[in-house]
Amino acid sequence: MICQKCNFQNEETAKFCRNCGAKLNATPAPHDNNGTQKPNTLGILGFAFSLIAVIPIVFPFFSFFDYNLSSFILFFAFLGFGLSIAGMITKHKKKNLSIIGFFISLFILISFILDIFGISVI
């Protein structure tokens, strides 16, 4: 494992650098060239697609499509669900939007499954 501070090559199981003594991170968060942490793009997209799926449910007058709205909702709910999971399993530390998007999509998908059995949630 390479030390982020002094670029010394350490053993893979080392917790501290043998050269400078700095703590070694086993899974560092992705950073750009100037040291700032990159945004969790997958989590942000998962959250955004989950919100798109919620819009016709929360605002029924906002149904601007002529075809069956459930296919639109399910498409974006599945897309938001998958991207939110992908955002949660990345090495980023900020996973809050991923988690919120996951639960929004999960609620929509469970409500559609329950609706198949005649139980109305929404």
Image: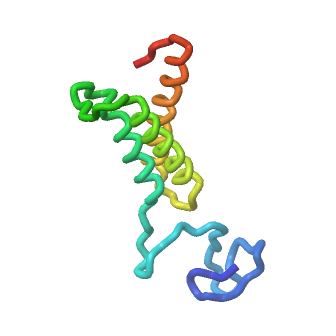
Q: Position of residue 52 (x, y in %)?
A: 34, 41
Look at the picture and state if 117 lies above or below 21: above
Q: Residue at x 57, y 58 (%)?
A: 90
Q: Position of residue 64 (x, y in %)?
A: 24, 34
Look at the picture and state if 91 lies above or below 16: above
Q: Is residue 13 left or right of residue 36?
A: right
Quadrant that contains the C terminus: top left
Quadrant that contains the N terminus: bottom right
Q: Is residue 18 left or right of residue 66?
A: right
Q: Position of residue 29 (x, y in %)?
A: 54, 67
Say which quarter of the image contains residue 113.
top right
The furthest residue to the top = 118
Q: Residue at x 41, y 41 (%)?
A: 50
Q: Nearer the viewer, residue 43 or 109?
A: 109
Look at the picture and state if 116 lies above or below 98: above
The furthest residue to the left = 61
Q: Position of residue 71 (x, y in %)?
A: 43, 33
Look at the picture and state if 3 lies above or below 94: below
* Numbered marks: total: 0
Say which quarter of the image contains residue 70.
top left
Q: Residue at x 52, y 60 (%)?
A: 92
The furthest residue to the front = 67
Q: Nearer the viewer, residue 12 or 78?
A: 78
The colour scheme applied to this rendered structure is rainbow
Q: Residue at x 50, y 50 (%)?
A: 83
